Amino acid sequence: MGTRRRPPPGGWPSGIETVPMRDHAEEAPELARRDVAIVRPAEGIPVRAWITQRQSGEARVDGEAVAWAGRQVHVRYLSYEGREGWAWLWADAVERR
């Protein structure tokens, strides 16, 4: 199955409300990062990323790269509503801030 984690009841420990499942960002295919080493930095790297949300459409969001594998980056982002989301994105959709 996918690597997306569901938030625990009450949200993540950060206390920030999470993006509802109906509006999660579309992710790059898991198969493309299978059998590729995942690198996790000690601290997130500030990034700006393009995402496509299921209901809201395309958006450019600020966030942080929390891991990468091959040509994909795992991004923790804040939506325009101030909600926290997580998505594996193609590296071309992510740039450092």
Image (cartoon, grey):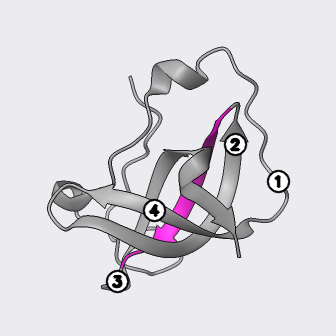
- The part of the image, by quadrant, that contains residue 33 is top right
State left or right for residue 34 relative to residue 27.
right
| Labels 4 and 1: the sequence-earlier one | 1
Magenta residues (range): 71-79
Crowd rating for badge 1 (residues with CA inside 10 Å; few <14, some 14–19, many 20+):
few
**Disc 4 marks which residue?**
50
- Tag count: 4
Instruction: Using the image, determine if residue 89 lies above or below residue 86.
Output: above
Residue 46 in percent (x, y) is at 70, 72
Residue kind at label 4, given as amino acid type: Trp
Q: Which residue is mark 3?
A: 80
Q: Which residue is labeled 1 in the image?
A: 41
Where disc 4 sits, the SS reads: strand
Amino acid type for the residue under numbered disc 2: Trp
Given the image, on which type of amino acid does mark 3 rest?
Tyr
For marks 3 and 2, give the CA distance: 24 Å
For the point 46% across and 81% down, the residue is 15
Residue for badge 2: 68
Q: Position of residue 83 (x, y in %)?
A: 36, 78
